[in-house]
Amino acid sequence: MSTRVRSISTLAFLLAAPLLFTSFPTVSAADEVVVLTTTTTQDSGILKHITEAFERKTGTKVKTIVAGSGDILKQGARGEGDVLLTHSPAAEKEWMAQGYGVSRRLVMYNDFVIIGPAEDPAGIKGGRAAEALKRIAEKKAAFVSRGDQSGTNVSELAMWRRAGINPKGQPWYLETGQGQGLTMEVAASRQGYAYTDRGTYLVFEKRLRLPILVENDPSLFNIYHVMPVDPAKFPKVNAVAGKAFADYVLSPEGQQMIGEFGKAQYGRSLFVPAAGKTEEQVLSN
């Protein structure tokens, strides 16, 4: 689509948005939407699940760009996509404050867990997350980190700070600079510990043979938001498509799909739908 046509589409959307989305979705929003999202949505499989359903429903093609949340937010700040689906709340709030997004709405959540060898040389099983990291550091047990400024990595580093430890540069602390799946596989090969979202872990669990050792800690919640990029800041952004995608994942149909994802294969949903809720409400559960 030419720049001129996209600009006209954007203007039409801004004028007619209340009518278009009163009972979303009713018509095809645009020919393509560029979704900037994280490796955890791809590795868990939910990204493909959502985008294929959105394409079937609207006739809009989806192009996905996948990286860590830090990189995705930078790309969004350059107007390189139409809508973001990320899980780095503090960074997202800063991104919105800088005027890059139209809105920021909660879509779903799961939680982070700490996995490691069944022998558990650091003795962390059943403990709280920050205390577990302290024990890993004390024992100098192998720990494999993504080291990529993704939402998962940001959460992990925040937990190390909570534990009062800076693991960077320590010989027992390895940073892969890669996505969640590969990072867990490296941890398995080294019989080390790793910090991961539960959804991606369940997909890789059988081949990792690294059990969950720390879980159900309120500080480990993993919350995802959807944020359409602001067309007033980036005129080439496809505002129609970006809002359509955001509205779909927040719609009753999209939320039901999220809630069902994973049940048949893993015996439980990989994500909890949370449209309409606030972070405070989720964290108080």
Image: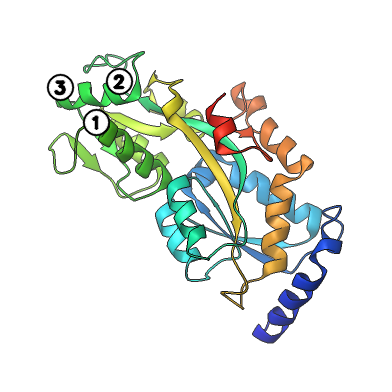
Q: Earlier in the sequence, mark 1 or mark 3?
A: 3
Residue in the image at 56% along x and 74% along y: 233
Q: Residues within 10 Å of mark 1 (few under 14, many from 20)?
A: some
**In which quadrant will I find the C terminus?**
top right
Q: Which residue is mark 3?
A: 139
Q: CA distance from mark 3 to mark 2?
A: 14 Å
Q: Which residue is mark 2?
A: 117
Residue in the image at 57% along x and 47% along y: 225
Q: CA distance from mark 1 to mark 3?
A: 15 Å
Q: Is residue 182 above or below residue 82?
A: above
Q: Which residue is mark 1?
A: 190
Instruction: Say whether residue 153 is visible.
Output: yes
The amino acid at mark 1 is Arg
The amino acid at mark 3 is Lys
In the rendered view, does 70 fall on the left or right side of 281? left
Residue in the image at 38% along x and 23% along y: 209
Residue in the image at 35% along x and 48% along y: 178
Taking the view exactly as shown, the residue that stands out farthest to the bottom is 4
